């Protein structure tokens, strides 16, 4: 490994250490929030027990009218069909409305495809928003992809009408990312109305644009520029905030486009997209682990999962893995102990089942899911990895054997097994640890260089503990 590679690895290690600290902060925050929710739940139960049925019903009706949610990052798309009045004068209103409904029906299909929430249609205007009601980090990309598809559909529709000598529709739209307040409406089927400066800005962007273009704000641009070819469009004055830079989106970058249309993503797009989207999956799984893991899991807890996710990325980069392989490794690491929410023994199998159920909705291909499941199952003891990715996760899963905090971490595993009556005395445990470590070997060159020396020191430390106890 030359000096440049060493420097690159050091940078990655610093980045991973920072990410690990951020994830630990998230864990602490989730723990505090869960405790707060538990206390609130107890208060609500006590309150409900003291209320009559009529009082509860009145309270629920009042709540139905006032439910509002705050989203710190949503992406709003506001579109307007141009040529409405011209077409209305050239054909009967019923046929015109049928055609407009057909266009909006296709828009509904597009927003559903990208998990975007349709907000409303008003006359010839269409509004939708990404990032609500399910928060996610990819909503700016999702909405811009949807906007490109809408424009492409209208272009095809326009060409068909033009060839028949008819008037045609044009689409003018604006996209902006920022905070919104969403009002939940309805009972059996929930819909949302959104308000705030983000909505107003998207509306103004639509008005400032030209038909056939996807106009986005600088805020959205900064979040999507790595995926799309964008051109500077100009400035738009915003009251109390100065001028807002605007950009037009021409299509996907060539390296992410399946063909020349600029709207069909290729495999490289989904890999890069997946590395960003991993944050959303991670938040879901960590929250599940925080809420559902048994209390006696002192070792196989949220922190262990975060450590393994961090470690597979570190070793993966050092071993020369591709972006796709890093994505597969991190995903497998995230799920490798998730099965503990179902059963302690054979938890790898249940983690694999969860991955198969969840990952298709996050654009993972069947082939990728198969590989992820194989990587998860490779963590079964004793480890018998068959390829590089399986070797990396095995080394990452047992990374603590060569770390300076081995003794306290090992004690948490002992405590976990002891509470399940799976182990005897601490002295018996330490003897078992010596036997295990003596027969264990790291599989990757990176892990051996980082941990092998420390692992030999651990044996001497455990032997001292055994001698002191005798």
Image: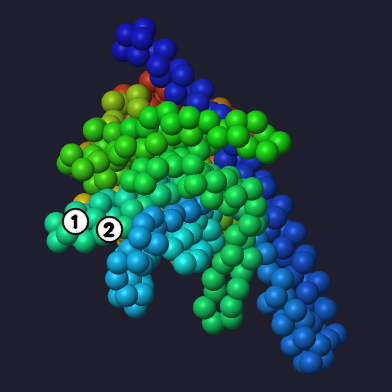
Q: Nearer the viewer, residue 301 or 318?
A: 318
Q: SS class of the residue under badge 2?
A: loop
Q: Quadrant of the N terminus?
A: top left
Residue 146, visible in the rendered structure? no
Which residue extends farthest front? 89
- Give the image's coloring scheme: rainbow
Which residue extends farthest right? 50
Residue 212, visible in the rendered structure? yes
Residue 320 horizontal/vertical position (percent)? 28, 26
Q: Nearer the viewer, residue 95 or 129?
A: 95
The quarter of the picture where residue 169 lies is: bottom left
Q: To which residue does mark 2 refer?
A: 168
Q: Which residue is rendered at x = 34% and y = 78% of the image? A: 94
Which residue extends farthest left? 163
Q: Quadrant of the C terminus?
A: top right
Residue 356 horizontal/vertical position (percent)? 32, 61
- Please, is residue 210 above or below residue 146 in the view? above
Q: Which residue is rendered at x = 44% and y = 54% of the image? A: 79
Q: Which residue is rendered at x = 36% and y = 43% of the image? A: 213
| C-alpha gap between disc 1 and disc 2 | 7 Å
Q: Earlier in the sequence, mark 1 or mark 2?
A: 1
Q: Which residue is rendered at x = 43% and y = 63% of the image? A: 124
Q: Nearer the viewer, residue 165 or 11?
A: 165
Residue 119 horizontal/vertical position (percent)? 51, 64
Q: To which residue does mark 1 refer?
A: 162
Task: Say if mark 1 contacts mark 2, CB within 8 Å.
Answer: yes
């Amino acid at each position: 490994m030359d000096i440049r590679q060493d420097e690159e690895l050091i940078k990655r290690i610093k980045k991973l250490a920072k990410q690990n600290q951020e994830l630990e902060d998230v864990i602490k925050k989730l723990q505090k929030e869960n405790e707060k929710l538990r206390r609130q739940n107890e208060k609500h139960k006590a309150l409900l027990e003291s209320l009559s049925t009529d009082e509860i019903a009145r309270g629920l009706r009042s709540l139905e009218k006032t439910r509002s949610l705050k989203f710190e990052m949503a992406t709003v798309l506001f579109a307007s069909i141009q040529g409405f009045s011209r077409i209305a004068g050239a054909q009967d209103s019923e046929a015109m409305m049928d055609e407009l409904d057909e266009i909006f029906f296709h828009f509904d299909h597009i927003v559903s495809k990208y998990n975007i929430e349709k907000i409303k249609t008003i006359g010839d205007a269409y509004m939708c928003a990404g990032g609500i009601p399910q928060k996610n980090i990819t909503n700016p990309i999702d909405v811009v992809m949807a906007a490109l598809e809408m424009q492409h559909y209208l272009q095809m529709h326009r060409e068909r009408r033009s060839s028949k000598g008819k008037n045609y529709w044009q689409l003018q739209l604006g996209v902006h990312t920022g905070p919104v307040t969403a009002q939940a409406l309805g009972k059996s089927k929930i819909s949302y109305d959104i308000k705030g400066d983000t909505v107003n800005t998207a509306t103004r962007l639509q008005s400032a644009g030209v038909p056939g273009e996807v106009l986005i704000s600088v805020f959205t641009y900064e979040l999507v520029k790595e995926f799309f070819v964008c051109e500077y469009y100009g400035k738009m004055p915003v009251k109390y905030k100065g001028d807002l830079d605007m950009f037009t989106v021409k299509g996907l970058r060539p390296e992410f486009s399946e063909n020349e249309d600029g709207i069909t993503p290729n495999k490289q797009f989904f890999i890069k997209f997946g590395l960003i989207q991993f944050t959303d999956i991670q938040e879901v799984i960590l929250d599940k682990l925080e809420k559902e893991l048994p209390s006696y899991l002192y070792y196989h807890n949220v922190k262990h999962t975060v450590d393994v996710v961090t470690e597979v990325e570190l070793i993966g980069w050092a071993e020369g893995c591709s972006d796709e392989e890093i994505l597969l490794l991190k995903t497998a690491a995230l799920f490798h102990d998730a099965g503990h929410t179902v059963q302690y023994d054979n938890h790898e199998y249940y983690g694999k089942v969860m991955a198969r159920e969840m990952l298709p909705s996050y654009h993972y291909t069947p082939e990728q899911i198969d590989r992820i499941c194989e990587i998860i199952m490779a963590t079964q003891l004793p480890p018998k990895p068959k390829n590089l990715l399986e070797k990396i996760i095995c080394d990452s899963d047992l990374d603590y054997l060569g770390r300076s905090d081995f003794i306290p971490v090992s004690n948490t595993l002992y405590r976990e097994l002891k509470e399940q009556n799976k182990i005897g005395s601490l002295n018996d445990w330490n003897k078992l640890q010596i036997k295990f470590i003596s027969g264990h070997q790291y599989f990757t060159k990176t892990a051996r260089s980082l941990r092998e020396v420390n692992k030999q020191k651990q044996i001497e430390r455990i032997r001292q503990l055994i001698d002191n106890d005798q």
